[in-house]
Amino acid sequence: MEPGSVENLSIVYQSSDFLVVNKHWDLRIDSKTWRETLTLQKQLRHHFPELADPDTCYGFRFCHQLDFSTSGALCVALNKAAAGSAYRCFKERRVTKAYLALVARTQNRVSQSWWSWNMDCMLATQCPRCC
C-alpha cells in the first residue's frame, strides 16, 4: 500500500447519510494542531468540501475511531440525525466490528482476506469494486 496523501482517499460506501472510507495506516483521524501535515479530516475536506460542517469541531462527524496505525473502514455521518443513529447503535452494542489481517508469506505471494462491516441499524452495501 502506498503512503498516505491528501489525494489517495478510498471511498467504500456513500449515501445521503453516511460516508464510509478506508482509513490509511499511520494516519490521524483529526487534529487541531498545525503540526499534523496529513489527517483523514484534511483528506475529506480536500475531496468533499461541500460536506464539511462548520458547526462541528473537526468539520465532520466521525462515528467511531481507529487507532493511528490501524487501517480500515471508518464511518462518517453526514448529518445530525445520522450521527445520532450511529451513536445509538454503538451505545446499544448493535455494531459488529471484524478485524482481519493480511499476512505476507513471501515478497510475491500474499494471502487473500476479506472484511465485513455489519450494522443492524444502518444499511450498507458492498462496494462494486470489491465484488
Image: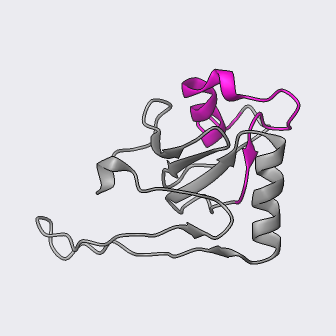
- Colour pattern: one colour
Q: Pick whichever, 100 or 87, lies toward us.
A: 87
Q: Is residue 83 left or right of residue 98?
A: right
**Residue 49 occupies quadrant:** top right
Residue 103: give x, y in percent of width and height. 29, 75
Quarter-of-image position of residue 88: bottom right
Give how far across and how far down residue 79 sits, in percent. Answer: 77, 39
Q: What residue lies at 65% left-to-right and 60% top-to-bottom?
A: 122
Residue 6, image x, y percentages: 50, 31
**Image: 1 above or below 119:** above
In depth, the one of 48 and 5 nearer the eye is 48
Q: Residue at x 41, y 56 (%)?
A: 126
Residue 29 visible in image: no
Q: Is residue 96 visible?
A: yes
Q: Nearer the viewer, residue 104 or 12?
A: 12
Q: Is residue 69 above or below residue 27?
A: below
- Residue 15 position, x and y percent, is 58, 41
Residue in the picture at 52% in, 51% down:
23
Classify residue 97 by image quadrant.
Answer: bottom right
Tell me if 87 is positioned left or right of 29 in this view: right
Q: Is residue 17 magenta?
A: no
What is the magenta range? 35-64
Magenta stretch containing residue 37, yes or no? yes
**Residue placed furthest toward the right:** 55
**On screen, residue 1 above or below 101:** above
